[in-house]
Image (tube, rainbow, N blue to C red):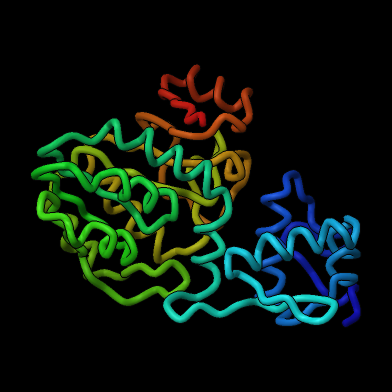
Amino acid sequence: MCIKNIKTKENETTGPEIHTTYERREQIARTLEEHPRLSVQDLSELFLVSTVTIRKDLTWLQERQLVVRTHGGAMLARSRYAEPAFDIRKQLQKLEKDLIGQLAAQLVHDGDSIAIDSSTTALALARYLVNRQELSIITNGIRASMELAGYPGISVLTPGGMLRRESFSLVGSWGAAVLQRVNIQTAFVGARGLTMGEGLTEVSSEEVAFKRAIIEAAHDVVALIDHTKWGHVAFATFCDIKRLKMVITDEWAPAQMVDQLRDAGIEVWIAKA
């Protein structure tokens, strides 16, 4: 394949701007969604790293069943249960998301009523709530609902809607109507981007509608944001900075932005290993 015909979202002429190994691996997987088969040499030229580095990246992705190695290259693996995008996001920054979810669970107590979205970081939170009692959770995430279904101390409300396969979530006006009649103590939300000017942003207008609805119904809003989302702006804003009570992130979040949030009166918790 001619490498100049491959474009990336970050940079269409000189290759993607990649800051971490995790970001490069995520972008490799996303590139393979658009170009089902690429050679190691293609990827090396596109991401401006050695073929040795690309082979290590492909091995890492294959171990997580995200790609299949081929002779001299790789192709995207297809999950039986979800489109690749969800599985990719679930695996990348897995440690950070797990730590964020574990820390966020400290805010949830027996008898609470909370909402979580369909983000992979919110899914990490759900896994730390299984021992709560008389806990009510509203979510549009199918994976989170399945994770919590077997625990009698937890009541799960899924507002319903159309299946959005990319995020394994339910979206649409049905859910928004239900949320107009509920009271939520805390809404826990993930995002694709966080900046001081644009607030929390998301790529899907359908997901934005659900996030806005649970935020409107909630007393407090807590953002669960790993370091790769800071400083990025996605398609649509769903929450202004001033609406946030707290941001929970990992220790690689940019210190300057963390300080800016704290100066604005927003609590920032740092999840550490």
Q: Residue at x 27, y 65 (%)?
A: 146
Q: Can residue 217 be seen in this view?
A: no
Where residue 6 sits, quadrant-wise, is bottom right
The vertical placement of 122 against 62, above or below, is above
Q: Residue furthest top?
A: 263
The N terminus sits in image quarter: bottom right
Closer to us: 21 or 157: 21
Closer to us: 18 or 179: 18
Compared across the picture, whether 200 is left or right of 5 comes to: left
Q: Position of residue 126 (x, y in %)?
A: 31, 49
The vertical placement of 95 against 16, above or below, is above
The vertical placement of 217 against 84, above or below, is above
Q: Residue at x 70, y 78 (%)?
A: 75
Q: Residue at x 27, y 32 (%)?
A: 107
Q: Position of residue 152 (x, y in %)?
A: 10, 55
Compared across the picture, whether 167 is left or right of 89 comes to: left
Compared across the picture, whether 164 is left or right of 11 comes to: left
Q: Position of residue 59 (x, y in %)?
A: 71, 64
Q: Can residue 251 be seen in this view?
A: yes
Total marks drawn? 0
Q: Position of residue 47 (x, y in %)?
A: 84, 59
Q: Residue at x 59, y 32 (%)?
A: 253
